[in-house]
Image: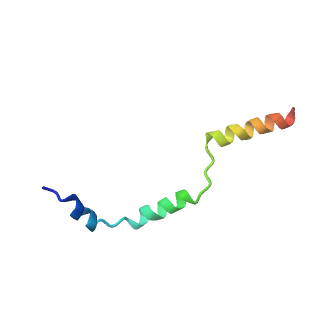
Amino acid sequence: MIDFEEELKQFEPIKEVEEAEDAIHHTDLTDLTDILREMVDIKDSKN
């Protein structure tokens, strides 16, 4: 039987995964909602 508590004690996160998580969390990503808002703002400013 697997002792999950013991397995978790041995777990060490992969350095590259931690670096990727940091990069993702510290990056201002533009999503579709941001693009649509910008398009609406541009359209409203032209009228």
Relative to 13, 10 lies left or right: left
With respect to residue 11, does 44 lie above or below?
above
Residue most toward the left?
A: 1
Which residue shows up at 27% across the image and 62% down it?
8
Q: Give the residue at the far top of this rendering.
A: 47
Q: Which residue is drawn at 21% across and 64% down?
A: 6
Q: In which quarter of the image is residue 13?
A: bottom left
Q: In which quarter of the image is residue 46?
A: top right
Q: Quadrant of residue 10?
A: bottom left
Of residue 6 and residue 42, the one placed in the foreground of this image is 6
Residue 30 vs residue 46: left or right? left
**Hey, which residue is sitting farthest front in the picture?**
5
Between 44 and 4, the one nearer to me in the picture: 4
Residue 1, percent from left and from top: 12, 55
The colour style of the image is rainbow
Question: Residue 10 vs residue 30: left or right?
Answer: left
Question: Which of the pair 45/5 is nearer the observer?
Answer: 5
- Image x and y of residue 21, in percent: 48, 59
In the picture provided, is 34 more to the left or to the right than 25?
Answer: right
Residue that appears at 44% across and 64% down: 18
The picture places residue 16, in percent across and down from the top left corner, at 43, 64
| Picture layout, residue 35 above or below residue 16 | above
Residue 19 spot, x, y in % from top left: 47, 64
Residue at point 87% right, 32% down? 47
